[in-house]
Structures are given as C-alpha cells and as structure tokens.
Amino acid sequence: MAIQVHGDEGRLARLVDSYLHRAIQQRASDIHFESLASSFRVRYRIDGILHDQAPISQSHRLHVLNRLKIMGSLDIAEKRVPQDGAFTQVVNGDKTSFRVSTFPGEHGEKVVVRILSHVTTLVLRELGMPDAQARALEAVVARPHGMVLVTGPTGSGKTSTLYALLRHLERPERNIVTLEDPIEYRFEHITQGQTNPKAGFTFARGLRAILRQDPDIIMVGEMRDKETADTAFKAALTGHLVLSSLHTNSAVETVIRLFDMGVERYVIASALRCLVGQRLVRVLCQHCRTPVPLDDGLRTLLGAPAHVEHIYQESSCHLCNQTGFIGRRGLFELVELDTGLADLLRSTDTSRTTLEQELSRRGILTIRDAGFAAVVSGETSLNEVYRVT
C-alpha cells in the first residue's frame, strides 16, 4: 500500500528522511526511488540484493524527487539529463554522507541515493580474509615499492580492502596520498584527494600531481584508462608503493586487461607485486540456518574434512528480515608474483590459457575455493557461493 502524506512540505521532508534513516538501520548501501508507469517504487539494496519497501503515492512523486534534488544541490528544473550531487546528514548521532544520482526515465526521473558511511571494518581478517592470505598480503605491502592491485566487479568490496591496507600502513612518518571517487572514509595521517572531472581533476591528472608531492605510498581508487595505468605502474617502478583497483573478474583477466590497455609487458612484470581478486558473499543468519547432510559427492566437491557431518542452507526469520542472511564477508584469491610468473608476463607468447594453467599448476586457491571453505565452516550456503562466483 502506497504511503500517503497530508500536510505541508515539512511532512514530505520527514517522509524522505524516514526512508533514509530506515535504510541505515537495515544496513542498506543504496536507496532506489523509481518512477514507474503506475507507481512510485522504493527499494533498498541490502547485502547486494534489492528489496521492495512501502511505495510512495504517485501524487507525491514530484515533491519527493524535488526534495532529494534539493538535498543533493541539484537543479530541480532540469529533468532531461542525468545529474549527480551529494549531501550529509546526522543520523542517530553519526554524520552520514550520501551521493545522489538522477536518471531521466520513460515515466519520469529515477533517483538513486548511495549511503557512504558503511566502511566500518578496516582489518583484512575482519573482512573475511584468511590469516595466511592476510599475512602474505601484509608482507607484500611492507616492501618499499611495487604495485598491488585489488580486482573484482562493482560491489565486490575492493574499496574496503584498499582502506584496510591503508589503515595497516598508516603512520605519521609516512607520506600517504590517495586519489578517490568518492572519499568514503577519512584517515588522520593520510592526504586524501577526490577527483572532479568537471574541473579537469581526473585520475590521470591527479596522479601526475601526486608524484610531485614526495609520496611514499599512493592509493589510486581505480585505474580507468591507459594514461592512469601507465603513470601508476611507472610510479611503482620508481620507488613508490602503489595500491589500486581494476574492474575484472579474476587475476588472469586482470593481466590480460592490462595488456589490452597498452601497458608494456616488461613494465607490468617489473612493477606488479600482488593481485587480489575478491567477491562478497552473504553470511547465513545464525538463528535460522538449517543443516544439510553431507553425502560423498558433496564432501569431495567442497573438500570437507571427515569430521564435518553437514553444511548449512538459508532459511528465514524475523532477525534477518526473512532473507536468511545477515551481513557479508569477502572471498579472496591472492596471487603473488615471483620471478617465474614475472618471466611469464614478459613473454609475448603468454596467453590467458598459459596463465591459467600456470596458476592451476601452482595450486593457487580460486575465489570459488574460498567460497567452498566458507560453506564448510558454516558461514554461507552453497547456493550463495554459486550465485557470486
């Protein structure tokens, strides 16, 4: 049933605020206000999945959209082109940042509000990274120079991993400079910059400026083009530790993407120290999860030890809002580059197949292997692992 509002603009403002506040209470990352043919739909993205909320009456659609635009400092008269804005609010005593994005649709504008205050876990192990992988990654970033790339699709937790690495590296005696879009977490001893393409402050231009700032460690939120990638890799070759991310689905795909972007093979081979591939998987609600007996085929597939008699699947209860899951954790693939892999990258004969065969020969655990381990430990379900991998 659509929510009706009677009264002045103040009550409409409180209605919008109530959706924002409930979204934070329910751990949502995004709120979708959607103009459809016969309704004005509201949905929350919680743990990566969109969930319908109580819709708003069509008669209030324009008022709500204008309210969101005003909050984001957007032009309420402009409905023909997309707009982007931002605002902050104090919710339950905490300052929360929001990004606002509009999109002109067939039946009116859609507004998506992203909640930016949810990066709270800044420790690799708390993100779900096994202790052995965390120790290996911390050893890599202890080196004075080189490139560390965190990879995965949109929404896979790359930013949280980069922030966890920054928190591990943060020291008053180090000059750490970041270039981000947007800044989602503030550090006391780190200089953080936010790109502004409208003003010409792009990743490529910002990175060139950072190199004149005497940095020890550089974090570039994302390598989006050849110029940024070239500059970042050359910085890693000339005495800087560089952390960045790339939208790819696996370690092998990351290397191929760098080749396709035009980064020289010898530069990649010389500068790249480590690739971290990742996904986010939902965590089973511990109150309502249900056991599933392990047969021999399932035990072999998962690599479950003999003492594990069952795994768990999702159910539903009031604590998890009938979803079967509460929260998410990371699944990680870690590839450290040694001399052998570096030589393989330098060779012009190296292909995707060659790289996949070499990583398989070395027994490097894939993201799906990490997912199976999480199933065996009872943290998530097999269905959820297949969904994200």
Image (tube, rainbow, N blue to C red):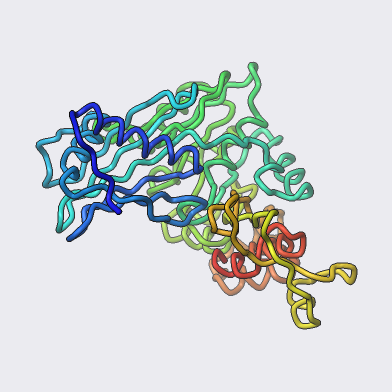
Q: Position of residue 208 (x, y in %)?
A: 41, 31
Q: Is residue 115 left or right of residue 302?
A: left
Q: Quadrant of residue 120?
A: top right
Camera-side residue of 269 and 59: 59
x 70%, y 57%: residue: 379
> Height in image: 359 above or below 287?
below
Camera-side residue of 137 and 72: 72
Residue sitting at the far top? 172
Residue sitting at the far front? 6
> Height in image: 12 above or below 226?
above
Residue sitting at the far right? 307
Q: Is residue 278 visible?
A: no
Q: Is residue 288 left or right of residue 103?
A: right
Q: Is residue 242 visible?
A: yes
x 54%, y 67%: residue: 387
Camera-side residue of 228 and 314: 314
Q: Position of residue 232 (x, y in %)?
A: 48, 40
Looking at the rendering, in which quadrant would you find the C terminus?
A: bottom right
Number of numbered discs visible in the structure rendering: 0
Q: Is residue 318 left or right of residue 264?
A: right
Q: Position of residue 75 (x, y in %)?
A: 15, 33
Q: Position of residue 294 (x, y in %)?
A: 78, 76
Looking at the rendering, in which quadrant would you find the N terminus?
A: bottom left
